[in-house]
Amino acid sequence: MRKIILITSFFLCIISSAQEKNIRVRYIKGLKKITDTTSRRPLMMKNLYYTLITNGKESLYYYKNGLKITGQEINKRFIKSGNDGGVFYKNIDKKEYVHQETFQDELYLINLKEKNWILTKEKQKINNYLCYKAVSQEIYFNEFTHKKMTTKYIAWYTPEISIPFGPNVFNGLPGLVIAGQIDGYYYFADKIEVNVGKKIITKPNKGILISEKEMKKKINELGKMLYKKYGRKQ
């Protein structure tokens, strides 16, 4: 209980100190097999960039078109892999956290919940920032493979940039997320611009309003259909 109170107090303090910061971060994305336990770096996709902009109170995260290489169709699928399609928006004051994304040709506005982060004492320098490790995980039943699966999230955040934002679903931590991992997908902040001028951030408002739980149900239903069609074939 004492640990939770300390984390909450620290979190509120950094939000207060970061409210006037206008920051733009460019993230690159890479891939590595989940079964690869070596220290080998993930394969980073060239010219594939994601942008995070924030004014300290709000944040917007989205893919920034930079692909000018062959095999674009494959790369477009990679863009959305790891639940990375669409736009992520968060507002601290209004407690709003949504993901605007297209699923089966329908545009949705998904209300998200924060991950249950566990803060650790493990630390390392990344891009000259002292970063601390936080972890989370989700256990679910995969309807396509008919197996229980675990999605693991690893975040490296820096209190040196005291905003609780990051790429994809990496939010709610006591500092900007410099690097993150969702199973075999990796994110690295390769360009950070602080005080870049006032940013007007607009919340996405188009799409069918749906909860995260309801969206997962839709994805599971699609998994069941695919399993019936393909999964039972030998």
Image: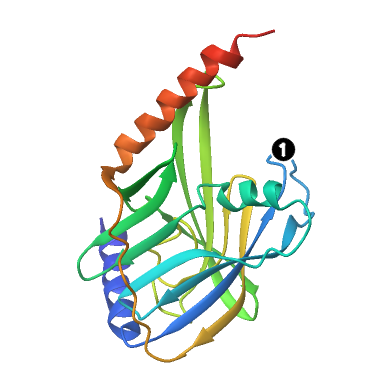
Which residue position holds label 1? 35
Residue located at (77% from left, 61% from top): 69
Q: Position of residue 84 (x, y in %)?
A: 52, 52
Q: Is residue 142 visible?
A: no
Of the 4 image quadrants, the one containing the C terminus is top right
Is 75 situated left or right of 135 in this image? right
Judge the density around disc 1: few (<14), some (14-19), many (≥20) Cα neighbours within 10 Å: few
Q: Position of residue 106 (x, y in %)?
A: 38, 41
Q: Please, which residue is most extreme toward the left here?
A: 94
Q: Nearer the viewer, residue 142 or 229?
A: 229
Q: Nearer the viewer, residue 159 or 178?
A: 178
Residue located at (32% from left, 85% from top): 17
Please say if 76 is above or below 175: above
Residue located at (27% from left, 74% from top): 12
Callout 1 amino acid: Thr
Q: Position of residue 86 (x, y in %)?
A: 46, 55
Please say if 17 is above or below 67: below
Q: In which image quadrant can residue 231 be found?
A: top right
Q: Position of residue 111 (x, y in %)?
A: 29, 50
Q: Nearer the viewer, residue 41 or 103?
A: 103
Helix, strand or loop status at disc 1: loop
Residue located at (72% from left, 59% from top): 45
